[in-house]
Amino acid sequence: MRPVRDAPLALIGYSADAARALRGAGLLAVPVPDDDPAAVLEACRTLRFIGALVHPSREVALAGYLDLDPEARRAGRADAVAFGVGAHGTYALADALKDALELSGYAAYGAGALLLGSGADLALALPLLRLGFGNVGIVADSYSEAERFARDVPAGVRAFAVGRRDSALASLSERADLIVLTGGPIPPGLLQPYHTLVDLTGQVSTGHSGAARLDLVRLPELRLGRQLLHATGQRYRPEDLSDLVAALA
């Protein structure tokens, strides 16, 4: 067990049980009221809290009161806050997904990807494109929405924006090796045996398609590790965070 740090960590939307669990990791965690985000954030800064973890149910409401990094801005939500000159929010889940894909050993460099989402949830998949994919299809509920996310694709990656009902979707999927579903349904017949699926909705069965499914079992620990790094500046090994993930669920 690590020694408890002097500067407290705010828990926004979490219970006292979660705070007690975090003490075992050396963090003086304190649940704070969450009914008035602006007042809570100002109080945390005044009382010299080091940072905050944000419950999923509060991520969207709090985002409007924070100085957001690019990932949080694209997603329209924040799951961790660092206090200093202002209150700086991040959305750690996006980069944690990239970490999970790297740890899986998936050969991303030069491969093709298809990102399929609905609204701001597409932002979750954009960090994956830093891993060297050669081309990517961005699929949203409308072409204009897909085009907006395509503008955030890293330089050097060929991006194609289409709507879910676009006839070009079938040909894009044939060129993809990895399909990442961040929200909404997956069109019937889209999955093929040569695809690998990352399903963030948890609702898709690969069934008779023969597609492989990427194991994301470490994603919650990777996410919490990134949240704590942003909120406290302290690094934790993901394998040491399993009990904390369960306590914060």
Image: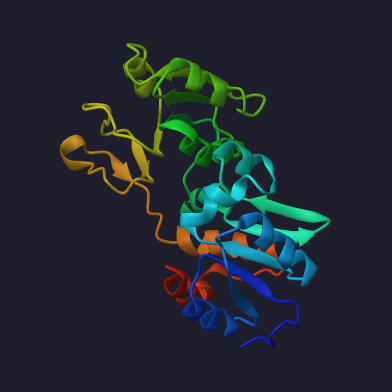
Quadrant housing the C terminus: bottom left
Q: Is residue 165 left or right of residue 116?
A: left
Is residue 70 among the parts visible in the rendering?
Answer: yes
- As displayed, is residue 206 above or below residue 148? below
| Nearest to the observer: residue 35 or residue 220 | 35
* Residue placed furthest toward the left: 208
Count of numbered badges drawn on the protein: 0
Residue 158 image offset from top left, x and y in percent? 56, 20
* Residue occupying the point 68% across, 60% down: 39
- As displayed, is residue 70 above or below residue 168? below
Residue 237 image offset from top left, x and y in percent? 59, 70
Residue 157 image offset from top left, x and y in percent? 60, 25
Q: In this view, does 203 lie to the left or right of 220?
A: left
Is residue 233 among the parts visible in the rendering?
Answer: no
* Residue placed furthest toward the right: 85
Give the quadrant of residue 216.
bottom left
* Residue occupying the point 84% across, 56% down: 85
* Residue occupying the point 64% across, 29% down: 154
* Residue placed furthest toward the top: 167
Quadrant housing the N terminus: bottom right
Residue 184 image offset from top left, x and y in percent? 33, 35
- As displayed, is residue 225 above or below residue 163? below
- As displayed, is residue 211 above or below residue 139? below
Q: Is residue 143 left or right of residue 45?
A: left
